[in-house]
Image (cartoon, rainbow, N blue to C red):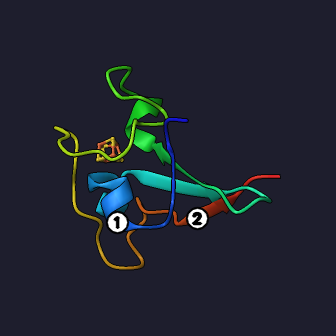
Amino acid sequence: MPGAAAILPDAVGLCFTCRWVRTATNRRGSVFYRCARAETDPSYARYPALPMRACPGYEEANPPGDPLHEGSERQA
Ligand code: SF4
């Protein structure tokens, strides 16, 4: 399934360190990687196919406290 991957940088690719990624974990422990750029730009997939090896929208995540990096969410 696009957007789902183990919590391994190589399995996720660029999204792992991108400031635009939002993660969610379901009850079974699967981690989903959602691209926040997709909310305003339809050229980005909401759940990108992983691993992401090249992306024109990639921006390295800033340190904790960056208001654009909301951190993890938990799905019901
Ligand atoms: S902008 Fe690209 S690298 Fe960043 S989260 Fe979206 S798809 Fe992944």
Q: Secondary structure at mark 1?
A: helix
* For discs 1 and 2, the disc positioned in front in the rendered view: 1
- Residue at the spot of label 1: 9
Q: Please report the residue visible at 80 percent of the width from the left and 59 percent of the height from the top.
A: 27
Q: Which corner quadrant of the image does residue 19 belong to?
A: bottom left
User: On the picture, is 10 further left or further right than 53?
Assistant: right
Instruction: Indicate the quadrant containing the N terminus: top left, top right, bottom left or bottom right.
Output: top right
Considering only vertical position in the picture, is 66 above or below 12? below
Look at the image and tell me whether residue 7 can be seen: yes
Q: Position of residue 17 (x, y in %)?
A: 31, 64
Q: Position of residue 53 (x, y in %)?
A: 21, 46
| Residue sitting nearer the eye, 70 or 76 | 76
User: On the picture, is 46 further left or further right than 73?
Assistant: left
Give the Cα distance between marks 1 and 2.
Answer: 16 Å
Residue 72: mark in rendering:
2
Q: Secondary structure at mark 2?
A: strand
Sequence-earlier tag: 1 or 2: 1
Q: Please report the residue visible at 41 percent of the width from the left and 29 percent of the height from the top.
A: 45
Q: Please report the residue visible at 49 percent of the width from the left and 66 percent of the height from the top.
A: 7
Considering only vertical position in the picture, is 12 above or below 40? below
